[in-house]
Amino acid sequence: MQRHLTMKNIHFLFIGVLLSLSVHLVAQPRVVDEAVFEKISKTFILNADGSQEYHYYKKIRYNTHHAFHNLYGETFIVYNPEYQTLKINKSITTMADGKVVETPSNAFNEVLPRFAAQAPAYNHLKEMVVTHTALELGAVVELDYTITTKPGFHLAFDKMILFKENDPVTDYDVTVKVPAGTPLRSITTATTATVKPVNDNGMEVYSWNIKNLPGATKDAYMPPSETTSVVLLASDASNYQQLFTKIVQQPAFEQQTLPESAQKIVDNILQENRMELMQILEIQKYVMNNINTVAIPDELLGYRYATPSEVWQRNYATEGEKAILMALMLKKAGFTAYPAPVADEKTYTLNVPVLSILNQWVVKIILADGKPLYLSPIFPTDVNMKYNYLEDKVACPLDVNIESLRPDLFTATLPINQLSVNMTLQEDNTLTGHADIKIEGGMNPYIAIEKESKKLKNLLTVIPEKSIADPKKPKISEQKTEVLLDFTLADACKINENYYFLTIPELTASNKATDLGALPTQRTSHLQLQTQRTTTDIELTIPEGFTLVTPPLSKESRKSFGYYTIEITVSGNKVKINRQLEISESLIIPVHYPQVRNFLLDWNEESYKQLIFKKK
């Protein structure tokens, strides 16, 4: 395991360098940047008494009215006053003519953070709203503040910094100061070089700097920021086990009994459902639907969690608290279950332990056959999350009796889909057919099917549920779903005079994964795709007197990220269509985007999915 992590560490360092270079080479400046951060400085200090300081400074120039009316007219600073104090060191605006205006006292207003509004237990949290004044085109705002944190609030001195802002940054500085002799580990994906500290009055000072950082884009279908941006990790913890051991040593994990009313809910679910999977899904459903979710960052709470009893009484919880409650309810139902925070594998395997890389929670359940099932405490999924949502991620199951951390790593698997259809178009415009469907891996909606068997009738495009007879010979498992579907579709073709237009069926999941809607001609950000290998074979028998107008076709495209082939052939009254698609790379770098765009547009071309007939 350690060797694996070490090799992955080296591998992703070089990936980080390449990704960083690709951003600088491909990213092109927008016609007008809304604003420019002329300077951003972040300084993190660990004091000898265990207290910590965060010193932030920004200098931003406004280029558009939208920048100061909508984007950067205010700064929002969230902190926890039970453990932290906020001090504003400087807040001024230098107008276009050089006049300097200090921010007036009534422009500093403390409010309750919006994410804590429906959570009374967290109403002590504060958000300082700094309203910047004297704003105009060309104005420059400088803001400098310090947040000081009491000893013991943070579980470690661990920091993750994403070198990323919505608009360009001319000069981005990060400094870390720790007492001399403190074992600090750090790494950045921008370089493989090790940063050596400089001694300054008994403090060891580490510094990083990036210049001319391009602004972030807001394109659709983007991968997580931490997988493509330059990331800095710094920590005085020796490993993740040290941090997780501290987390589980709190009442939220130590509690092993449920409130009486919660136990009754569990008992009722067990009585009403005999199937193992349905018992688990009903408990998940109860936690999702009956405990409100509040989006309070774990870091802001010092990774302290309410107990299941407190959550039950409050009827609201953070995602982590819901995972802890759901795991305990499953345990009381007789299952082995663990709440598990999740991180992206690329940042986790850099092997510098930082808790803020954890970006979601799941619950790991061990089924009777010994196989693990991963579910979310806040949203339903059609699949075991390990087949889709957790690909290229790491889950860390937590238990109060933890002795050694055994993270679950999820490597990407290629979903394999097969659709074979034999169908006949009748003279009265009725389409009858027989479909043989096999779906394997991340596109296999077996959980949705187990919950509601009629979902088997939603596997095809074009053919509505009401046109499909009861499924035949269904074989459903988390690995693969196989089923035979017979259908009779009235008014199958759109008719225009003597011309008939028929759209061929496809697998719904495959179509959804490739039809991304409008794709701009240029893109400067990475594109996240769903990998898959899909084969569609269709044989259509047409009635006497019908002639295929659509010309025969043989088209293919083979690229580094995948391939497709499309064939339409005619023999007598038989029309055969073969469509094969493979997307083997999920992360598309900007330089390859034009190829991917053309690839997807061709694959989804409507004329290749539609047959046109002429009736004599």
Image: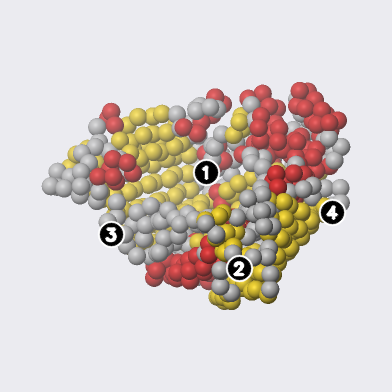
Quadrant in the picture for the C terminus: bottom right
Q: Which mark is residue 31?
A: 3
Residue holding disc 1: 50
Q: CA distance from mark 2 to mark 4?
A: 35 Å
Q: CA distance from mark 1 to mark 2?
A: 82 Å
Quadrant in the picture for the N terminus: bottom right
Q: Which mark is residue 536?
A: none
Q: Secondary structure at mark 4?
A: strand
Q: Nearer the viewer, mark 2 or mark 3?
A: 2
Q: Which quarter of the figure has residue 95?
A: top left
Q: Secondary structure at mark 3?
A: loop
Q: How is the image coloured?
A: secondary structure
Q: Return the disc, 2 or 3, that comes first in the chain's sequence.
A: 3
Going by the numbered disc 1, the residue's amino acid type is Gly
Side of 46 where 373 appears, left or right: right
Q: Return the disc, 3 or 4, that comes first in the chain's sequence.
A: 3
Q: Return the disc, 1 or 4, that comes first in the chain's sequence.
A: 1
Residue 19 picture location, percent across and down? 48, 67
Going by the numbered disc 2, the residue's amino acid type is Thr
Residue holding disc 4: 473
Q: Secondary structure at mark 2?
A: strand
Q: Nearer the viewer, residue 9 or 612?
A: 612
Q: Return the disc, 2 or 4, that comes first in the chain's sequence.
A: 4
Residue 406 picture location, percent across and down? 73, 55
- At horizontal 52% and vertical 43% (from top left) the residue drawn is 50
Residues at discs 3 and 1 in contact (Cβ within 8 Å): no
Q: Nearer the viewer, residue 589 or 494?
A: 494
Q: Return the disc, 1 or 2, that comes first in the chain's sequence.
A: 1
Q: Which mark is residue 547?
A: 2
